[in-house]
Image: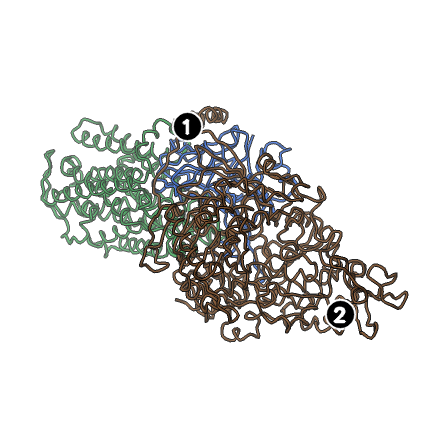
Amino acid sequence: MSESTVTRPGITRRSFLKATGAVAGVAAVAGGTSSLVAFADGEASNSSAEETICYGVCRSNCMQSCRYAAHVVDGKLVKLTPAEYAEDLYRGSCLRGMSYMHRIYSPHRIKYPMRRVEGTERGAGEWERISWDDAIAEIAEKLSSISQEYGPKSIVFDFGTGNYGEIQGQTGIFNRLGGVIGASKPAGMNDLATGYGIDRVLGTGLMYFANEAKSVLDSSHIVVWGSNPVHSTPQNWRWMQRAKEQGTKIIVVDPVKSATAHKADVYVPIKATTDGYLALAMANYILENDLQDNEFIAARSTAPLLVRRDTGMLLHKSDYAEVAEGEENPAYVWDNATGAIALYGEATDPALEGTFEVDGVTVDTSYTLLKQQLADYSISEAQRITGVPEETILELVDVFTKGDAVSVNISFGMDHYMNGYQSCWAIAILMALTGNLGRDGAGFTGIFLNTALALNMKALWAAPGFVGMTTAFPMTMLHEVAETQKFNGEDYPIKAMVSIISNAVSNWPSQNNFLEKILPALDFYLAMDMEMNDTVRYADMVLPVASFYEHEDFRKAHNLPYIVHQSKAIDPLYEAKDDVEICGLIGRAMGFEEAFPESNTFETYANLLLSSEACEKFNVTLDRLREEGYIDLSLLPGKPGIVGRTKFTTESGLAQLYTEKPAPRVNYGQDVKERFAKEHLVYYQPSAEVCEESEAAQKFPIIFIQEHSRWRTHSQWFNSPVLRELDPEPIYKMSPEDAQERGIESGDIVEVFNDRGHMVLKCVIDPSLPQGMSRMPKGWQREQFIEGGYQELTYPTHDEWAVAFNFYDTRVDVKKR
Amino acid sequence: MTDMTSAAAAAPINVSQNTQQQGKKSSTPWKSTGLTVGIIVCGILTIAGIALWAMQLSGGMIQTGMRNLDSWGLYITFFMFFVGLSAGGLIISSVPKAFGIKGFGGISKVAIMSSIACTIAAIGFVVVDLGQPTRIWELFVFSNIGSPLMWDIIVLGTYLILSCFYLWAQMANERGKVSDKALRILSVIALLCAVMVHSVTAWIFGLQQGREMWHTALLGPWFVSSALVCGTALVICVVEALRKVGYLSLDQAYIVKLAKLLGAFVCVDLYFFACDLLTEGFPGAHGADVVSMLVSGQLAPFFWIEVVGCAVCALICFTPKLRTNPLIVIASLLAIVGILCKRIQLLVGGFQLPNLDYVGVLSPQTITNWESGWADAYAGMVYWPTPLEFGVMLGVVALAGLIFLLGIKFLALQPGDKIQAESEK
Amino acid sequence: MNYGFVIDQERCIGCHTCAVACKIENNLPDNVWWNRILTDGGAEMDIPAGEFPNTTIEYVPVNCQHCENPACTKVCPVGATYKDEETGIVHQDVDKCIGCRMCMSACPYTGVRSFNWEEPTHVLDMNIGGVDAPEHQKHTVEKCTMCSHRVAKGEEPACVEACPARARFWGDLDDPNSEVSQLIKKRSFKQLLADEGTKPSIYYVG
């Protein structure tokens, strides 16, 4: 660590201060006035350093896309300040974004290419500095020979979320390299269950379910359900706070009294993972008491669409007539006016409910099936399962049925349990039945993604010689495949891995699997990063990469209606290189000159990516981005982006009460048939481990969640010196009851453990946790613990349909050390 | 160790009464091996203290126990304590002269000498507490005369000069060069100055509205009474020691008189303490926290040592049977320790109860025991000195001892003929 | 003119962004924080008080209160800390400070004044923040300058600019039309340790 003391370059200023000091001192004694004017004059004329300002956008995975002004003096980035957006309340910042330069200039930064010293263990921390030439030659040699011997699929490209730049980031240039190599790319599993669940109703895919953040200004109620925007998305909370000041009521449903719950009007504690049951019981109560939004159900949902009992499919036009590929294939409804079926939109009085015989086939309306499905979910049972008192549930019912416009801030809290998608699906159904969708102030909020601007990913990814990456299995299965070198009974060698803006060792569940099963299988593990995180520590070779401000890029802003430019503020420090350059070097060294000609620069790739119809329509060009900093992509100027404002992105354009063709999120050879029939209609599924009836619950009484705190974005900023001053060490928080039972006091060192692993760290007693719940801010690296690490505790399995990481579905016990 | 040499080494003495061993009454230096050893020891300790101080300045005050939330420590405690010690001597010697009443035999000059030594120590403690001692000249150039610290610096400086002058005047008076009247006027001035020094020192703390423990009007008089307690006690100890080693002789009646006086002062001091505790505690507001902190909280040991020590002291002083020399010395030492405990309570107590009862970020600069978390930082005493501070403190105390012993050695501080004659009447 | 802050505790989410902005803008040494976000709740930072689910927590960002009647300026023996009558800013002249820490004892808002207990170190081997940011000296007291170097250029303090919750306001409390004056006119406010009589220039509304 640098101990050097730095004095400012301006000797002039120092002497100046002396002068004013003396003057001021005299003035103070004399009771006179000292002069700020003098101060100002002095400063202005004496500032020796020239400051230039350029603009960029934070690209971390908090997904909030704050824009920053980068102040550069003598080629050094000296500060970052929040930069404006057309909509002032989108101007954001946070302690991480503002202290990013502490990561750039950190004494912990990786400076040179380094190779694990031969003969030392992975993770032993013995490194030798090598030249870029040697590094690239060795990487190319290793990857090429492994590819030749075991096939290109034996090389795993692991993409993380450390950079959301379009060229240098997660979906950027390394996909081009992976594509020409033909590497394996395990399916990503982060934060995908929420979208997968909501997609059943809204057809919004995995990530497009949320309205724009500012839409909450039109909400009468905001239900923050299993998320904690005060900590995890403060830029969105800013809008919610404004809404609250205008009279919007904020209700938080959460098993812990989160920071957001402390700011809310109402806090509804709920047993973890039972949210789905609550939503379904409310939905049933609403239907039983005729409180639903009939207008919405009739006009905007699939309620009248008829479902065949024999196949479970909708009764489609194609059941009776030839429908050409690409031609619309509407479903039938029952027209009460004629007593016969009619194509949707053609009936004068479509029946919302009922069971009918159509040419010997029994059909029910979607609505009828949903009602039958929901009939089992009662408020009294909900009270038992969720722990929420009946009267509170009824108050929540009031919110959804009487509120003018209810938005549900959902994000990825419920997502992180095995039953996450069912919970989110259930809430989406509740929203549909109460008409809280597709209009101002109503719908989901979380991370808004802009649907308007499709970039030309194909042009960037599919280089000459493109064979494409293979996504045969999800990330959670890599350890099995690596251990057995087989997948689905067939040989599937896994011999090399490349972690790209990824800290997989830290951010994949069941850390011990990574260390004990994946690593030993690898002949070569390459990591590229700025800091010595868990992943880098276990790699064979590490390349120093450029930071956000050391290269040019742009971000089709998540959360905002803009595409935002990042200008290169400073040259990469030490020997760091950006991804475009690294990719080119590796690509050419491996013989992919055509995909990566030396003449290709950031600009080449940027222009490829921006060569789309949508970019033309919005006039998005690199030149314009460079000049204007960001470009507004709002569809209705001044109006917030609302999901399903005119129609939903389902096949029918309607909110689906019945999912005709449910499909697993990822097909990796699992038995899809078994659950298919069950997946048409929403249902409650107890979570795997956290639910009270689970086997684990008998053994491990305490639920453990790894909360998202303000100190880190996943594991990024884990070693930022300035933030570590504020938040110096891992802290495990437990309820007063659990602590007392175990004789634990705040400040004690505890061991948190289950069958999968353990961690040893300091404990603090936190009364915002009910008995049986515990949490700790995530992102700490193994070396920061006294022993072990929190990611050892999580399990590596997934729901076969949602195929998502279930970080929170974890039980532990605790003992005092 | 050093202060023992100068003031209290006489503790275990078991002298027979009325040791009449006559010191040499002349202006020639008084010779004694013990004295020489004392001077050498004090000198070495002083040099060691200076070396440690240099260490403190170069390595930074991070080596002390002081931090942002407890920004004063041992040095300021001892500053307060030594200001108190210094006053006693001057008051003891000036009161009789100022009011023309019968004095305490020939101890006046020794008492003044102890005052001078203690004043220098007090100033020394302020200096070693400064972060930028090389900027001390600013005090005279940019003096903010509104600052109680500035008042104290002025008064303390004046007091030191006056003490020296007063000592010279007494010696000159004995040689007939200064008239009795002039000496009497000077005595009045000296007395006023002594009272001022205490009040002003009290105001350094008492005028700070920000600290519940300090902000009381009683603090001024209370400081004066505490000064009288420990000043008198110090004089008793010094005199007994000097009697023991044969530097001076003194009628036992004067010792008894001093002891009775000490007992009275201790009672006044305890009375002030009781008044303060009642005033603090009665409303049951924040002041109650102060009371419980003292009586049963983190500072309880110091509180009880003070209260019990002073009570025992008073008991000894007021019970004729107990007024034997050893017990009187013990009583005096108890009083001195008691007042030191009072100073510790006052200083640490000022920081022990945070004004803003909120928790925040802890850093190595925040609070002494920052590593163990907020609750633990305040669980025990919020501040405790480091060995370096003890070392520097010892050095400053040794400096006082050195000055005092040099005074004994080179100045004729024994009772003058005039007083000797008076006392033999 | 009397510049002051209004801090909206309803809006404040205790995110420490203002503290970090201050730290960077003023090139503060390691472990020195002029602007601290205190937790009004349980015994540890970010931990609420009370019993589940009826727990409470509030955040109190505390920097120099730039009092109208400052306790610190009165006691400084050399006038190193003084109130600028034109702006209301309480300055600290580190070139003059003798390190007696009288001001730290006098200030009721313990902790807003910070003493450099050792040679200031910076974890980054470079100067950061404003090009005209203040210097830092060993064994002197320092504190929030209200970003006077920015104010002099017509900019607002860094903490105000940075606040993502828009909870910090800054302006002239003497100007009845300023945003800060309007806020304290319209909303109930409190001042830290108001009964100390220091008349702090930071108003907490909520």
x and y percentages locating residue A594 in the rendered image: 51, 46
State the blue chain.
C
Q: Residue at x 43, y 69 (%)?
A: A815
- Judge from the rendering whether residue C103 lies leftward or rightward of residue A167; answer left or right: left
**Label 2: chain letter:** A
x and y percentages locating residue C155 in the rendered image: 54, 32
> Is disc 1 placed on a helix, strand or loop?
helix
| Residue B292, above or below A684 | above
Which circle marks residue A13 in the picture? 1
Could you say which is closer to the camera, residue C35 or residue A354?
Answer: A354
Could you say which is closer to the camera, residue C80 or residue B120?
Answer: C80
x and y percentages locating residue C9 in the rendered image: 58, 47
Which quadrant of the figure contains the C terminus of chain B?
A: top left
Could you say which is closer to the camera, residue A664 or residue A69?
Answer: A664
State the brown chain.
A
Q: Which residue is mark 2?
A: A371
Q: Residues within 10 Å of mark 2 (few under 14, many from 20)?
A: some
Q: Residue at x 24, y 42 (%)?
A: B396
| Residue A664, above or below C81 | below
Residue reaching furthest to the right: A338
**Is any atom of residue B118 visible in this view?**
yes
**Is any atom of residue C19 visible in this view?**
no
State the green chain.
B
Q: Residues within 10 Å of mark 1 (few under 14, many from 20)?
A: many
